[in-house]
Image (cartoon, grey):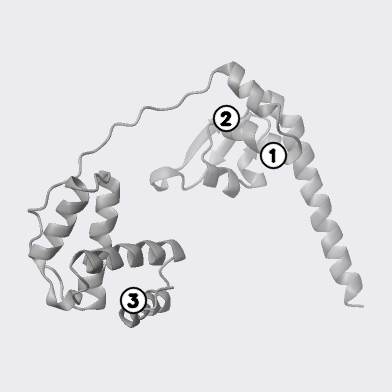
Amino acid sequence: MSSSPFLRSVHDFMIVRRYSRRTVKSYLYWIKFYILYHKKKHPSELGEAEVEAFLTFLAVERHVSSATQSIALNAIVFLYARFLNKPLGNIGEFKRASKQCKLPVVLTQGEVKCLLSQLTGVHYLMACLLYGSGLRRMELVRLRVKDVDFDLLQLRIWNGKGAKHRITTLAPELTELLQRQINRVKECLEDDLKNRYLGSV
């Protein structure tokens, strides 16, 4: 947490309005960087030209990615529009960071087997579902028992990327492991309920 009273007030402003911790940390970083770049001048004394200069500096001198520059821009727009209640005007003249093409990293079958061989238990099952059914991490975490169709060997995914629903395949080799895990969870829940009931007597 910064010792700057101004940054502390920005921090408290975001916390009260339930901004995520990640967003708070990111915005404070870029707001502080923006202030330091302009020799610690108060943001209320700066305007569109100074914002454009800072964003151009990030692209030309720091060689940040397009995504990083966008986060910095979002932080500064928030600072002026929400915190200072002084929305910025046209700031479209800054140098845009170039988008970098990313090549996908694809593991060979041998590499996948080697990776899975290092895992056991529920971690092995999770990794197999991620790889075999093409699930994203949050889709796996949100997967419910009623979303598993053992008869049709399908998984129903709700609110995936882009808030879209879809159906994906379930590898037959995973059905026994998945059923065992479901039964194990049910037993744990039943034991927990029994303990709670006995503890209240």
Q: Is residue 58 above or below residue 38?
A: above
Under circle 3, the secondary element is helix
Q: Residue at x 65, y 23 (%)?
A: 114
Which numbered circle lies on residue 170?
A: none
Q: Quarter of the image holding residue 51?
A: bottom left
Q: Quarter of the image holding residue 29?
A: bottom left
Which numbered circle lies on residue 123?
A: 1
Q: Residue at x 20, y 47 (%)?
A: 59
Q: CA distance from mark 1 to mark 3?
A: 41 Å
> Residue 62 placed where, x, y %?
24, 48
Crowd band around label 1 with a 10 angstrom C-alpha radius: few (<14), some (14–19), many (20+): few
Provide the residue designation for mark 3: 7
Q: Residue 15 or 57: which is nearer the viewer? A: 57
Drawn side of residue 105 relative to residue 99, left or right: right
Drawn side of residue 30 relative to residue 80, left or right: right
In contact (CB < 8 Å): disc 1 and disc 3: no
Amino acid type indicated by mark 3 = Leu
Q: Tell us which disc is closer to us: 1 or 3.
A: 3
